[in-house]
Image (cartoon, grey):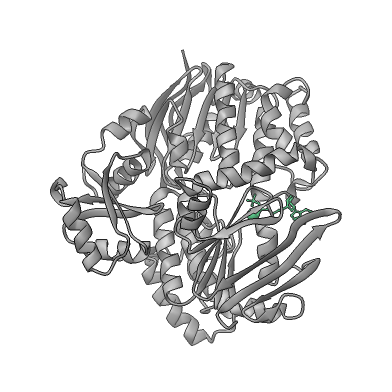
Amino acid sequence: MNAVVLDHITKTYEAGKVLAVDDVSLEVAAGELFGLIGPDGAGKTSIFRILTTLLLPDKGAASVNGRDCVKDYKAIRRSVGYMPGRFSLYQDLTVAENLHFFATLFGTTIEANYDLIRDIYEQIKPFSDRRAGKLSGGMKQKLALCCALVHKPEVLFLDEPTTGVDAVSRKEFWEMLRTLKQQGITIVVSTPYMDEAVLCERIALIQGGKIMSVDTPANVIATFPVKLYAVKAANIYRLLTSLREDTAIDSCYAFGEYVHVTFRDDAEPDLQQWQQKLTAQGHEQVEAKKISPSIEDSFIRLMNEKQNGQP
Amino acid sequence: MNDKVIVCEELTKQFGDFVAVNHISFDVRKGEIFGFLGANGAGKTTAMRILCGLSYPTSGKATVAGFDVYKQQESIKKNIGYMSQKFSLYENLTVVENIEFFGGVYGLSSAEIRRRSDRLVNKLGLAPEAKKLVGSLPLGWKQKLAFSVAIFHDPQIVFLDEPTGGVDPITRRQFWDMIYEAAAAGITVFVTTHYMDEAEYCNRITVMVDGKVEALDTPGNLKARFRAASMDEVFYQLARGAKRSAD
Ligand SMILES: Nc1ncnc2c1ncn2[C@@H]1O[C@H](COP(=O)(O)OP(=O)(O)OP(=O)(O)O)[C@@H](O)[C@H]1O
Ligand SMILES: [Mg+2]
């Protein structure tokens, strides 16, 4: 059975002037860990808000665990957990009071489902008497997640849950999502972190309110159409500037300590010659190699193709 | 001495009994891109707010652009730009109104503001959006605009608190192009981020753990010291230590 179904959903704002969701159809299987990936303004938050019954679509139908998002909104609200991107906490309540409030709202207690939230909650528990407004940015995200989980929802909607969360906690957070999945909870999550997109079973790439593809991360990466190279030098910014002036290069962008490069007509450079050329241009400690693309490379390529109107 | 634009010695901030920033010491050099990393709650924003002249330390010393963080907060504010972790523009003003407002705050003449404002709007490719409310722009655009506004008055130093949080991979890179450009023009950049690939783009990095500076070096040296292939690993080794002591 599908836990989440979107059937030709369209949503506009400002009396039809802004098209936020453009005829989107999508199915998420029960128990699946599903990612919505796309740039800001792509329509992800609108989709979350329609599925959590907080927003009415202009056209189309949506359902969660067989319940209609418009007619059965009450049943849906009781059975799903939703973590909106920002501002879901009561800033003037303490950490403990916020969690207690959400538990009470859903007629449960913190203790009843403590197992679900333990790993994350223990990190902010030392500060349980602190008002939410005085927490650091990432600590707020952790509390918001606990609040969305405290009633053991059937389906969990997480809109950029790890934005502002540090690298160590993000790893722990995704381990926790995997545990939740093992307990049968369906999870739909959006994220700007591409290393997290890889951890989803399937991802939908969204841009401009439209779904560009739905596939496993492995398949998305496998369809990267050209050869990819990584090159580094002592001064990355200068290297980037040189590469941008090279007419043989089709695309280049910083990627940690390397710059990733593709060549026009998918040409294959002689690595040795290329390194010598860059060294002659005054770059130091040049190192170039051929690499396999990551999901972030795929994403950047797909988004740029779409923007430049290529197929 | 002259090329040190930020000097911190034993800088400390307490909230009641809680020590948020714990005797931190470091220097930042002119024109440097200085990365300020650390786990959630490590004390980055708290320290940054002191350096921006927005809050007083409990003890310790610091100067920013040569001005004292206790006695010369107003001079500090005039000589720096600050982009806060929360969004730092007015959502219900238009793009141009925001630029005019902040230009005015920094005491630029209206002719100067208009000249710079036109140049900026064109450079960002925001001309069609100039009369739109900032609240209606995608996050990436807002952040680029907020950065431009933060350096609108040609400050000596710009402080950026998680400027790319939640920003997509393409826009993130465009943002870093702007950072490089500002640094090349001589503006010192003090930046926090949770994206470890961005840590690689900094000249030097500090990693804060539980209010203390646990490491300070170039990304290359840090990786060598921790025998790590990436900054992600360096960070993991340092910040995981914090979690243990919290148990
Ligand atoms: N006004 C305040 N009163 C009490 N505690 C505070 C106050 N401001 C900050 N803190 C606490 O100080 C610590 C450091 O917070 P800070 O915001 O500096 O962290 P951070 O390193 O910026 O974290 P993040 O990466 O999550 O933004 C946290 O434990 C926070 O709750
Ligand atoms: Mg912070």
Image quadrant for the C terminus of chain B? top right
Image-based side of A298 in relation to A65, left or right: left
Image quadrant for the N terminus of chain B? bottom right
Give the image quadrant in which the ligand numbered 2 is located: bottom right
Seen at 58% across and 77% down, the residue is B4
* Residue B188 visible in this rendered orientation of the protein: yes
> In the image shown, does B148 or B155 lie closer to the viewer?
B155
Task: Give x and y (percent) for residue B179.
Answer: 45, 66
Residue B23, by quadrant, is bottom right
Image-based side of A156 in relation to A41, left or right: right
Residue A280, by quadrant, is bottom left
Q: Is residue A241 above or below residue B238?
A: below
Task: Give x and y (percent) for residue B227.
Answer: 49, 46
Q: In this view, does B120 lie above or below A296?
A: below
> In the image shown, does A98 or B233 lie closer to the viewer?
B233
Seen at 59% across and 84% down, the residue is B107
> In the image shown, does A200 or A78 lie closer to the viewer?
A200
Q: How many labels does the image show?
A: 0
Residue A209, by quadrant, is top left
Seen at 61% across and 78% down, the residue is B105
Task: Give x and y (percent) for residue A187.
Answer: 53, 26
Q: Is residue A152 above or below residue A190?
A: above
Among all residues in the image, which is located at the extreme top?
A: A1
Task: Give x and y (percent) for residue B12.
Answer: 76, 63
* Residue A163 visible in this rendered orientation of the protein: no
